[in-house]
Amino acid sequence: MSSDTDPGMNWLLELHPEPRHVRVTLSGHFRVNALREVWTDIFTKKLWRQDAPIVFDLAEIEVIDLTFKDVEETVAMLREIRGELPGGRLIIIAGAAVQFGKTRQYQTLADLRRGLRVDVFKTEAEALQSLIDA
């Protein structure tokens, strides 16, 4: 799916049975304002469930000029979402060094807000293994 407000960011939502999770594959240019549309799409399709963690795959997205304020804004979105499903789990696969660093900032801020577990991995294999081990 492509965002109407920012055609530079696209996403694909898929429910995977084993290990059970919802895969969100982002591509194009990352934009914070389009991320809200991604979450709306997830909720509209009723994919956010206690038994199906959300896995964001950033392998195909370009993250440039992402400021600390942008990271704080994404955490604010997470705070709103937390009320929809307390105790849910969010996993981020961020292989590139810049992506990994920014997502670790996100993880740290999210941990301070409590209520939703956020894990960051560099590879898909690590992320999927964490789902199997959970």
Image (cartoon, grey):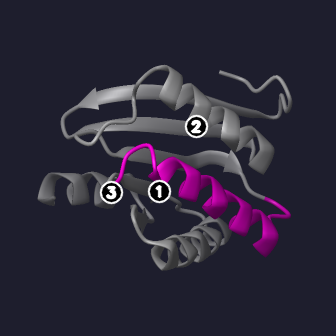
Where residue 51 sits in the image (x, y, percent)?
A: 22, 40
The nearer-to-camera label among 3 and 2 is 2
Say if 31 sits above or below 106 in the image.
above
At 40% from the left edge and 59% from the top edge, which residue is drawn? 123
At 80% from the left edge and 70% from the top edge, which residue is drawn? 69
Where residue 101 sits in the image (x, y, percent)?
A: 61, 75
Say if 18 sits above or below 122 in the image.
above
Q: Nearer the viewer, residue 67 or 50?
A: 50
Q: Which residue is mark 2?
A: 39
Say if 6 sits above or below 55 in the image.
above
Where residue 119 sits in the image (x, y, percent)?
A: 39, 65
Going by the numbered disc 2, the residue's amino acid type is Trp
Mark earlier in primary sequence (3, 2): 2
Q: Which residues are magenta?
A: 64-86
Going by the numbered disc 1, the residue's amino acid type is Ile
Left or right: 88 in relation to 6? left
The nearer-to-camera label among 2 and 1 is 2
**Residue 127 circle label:** 3
Mark earlier in primary sequence (3, 1): 1
Going by the numbered disc 3, the residue's amino acid type is Ala
Left or right: 114 in relation to 15? right
Left or right: 131 in relation to 106? left
Task: State the image quarter where residue 118 is shown.
Answer: bottom left
Q: Which residue is mark 1?
A: 92
**Residue 65 circle label:** none
Quarter in which the N terminus is drawn: top right
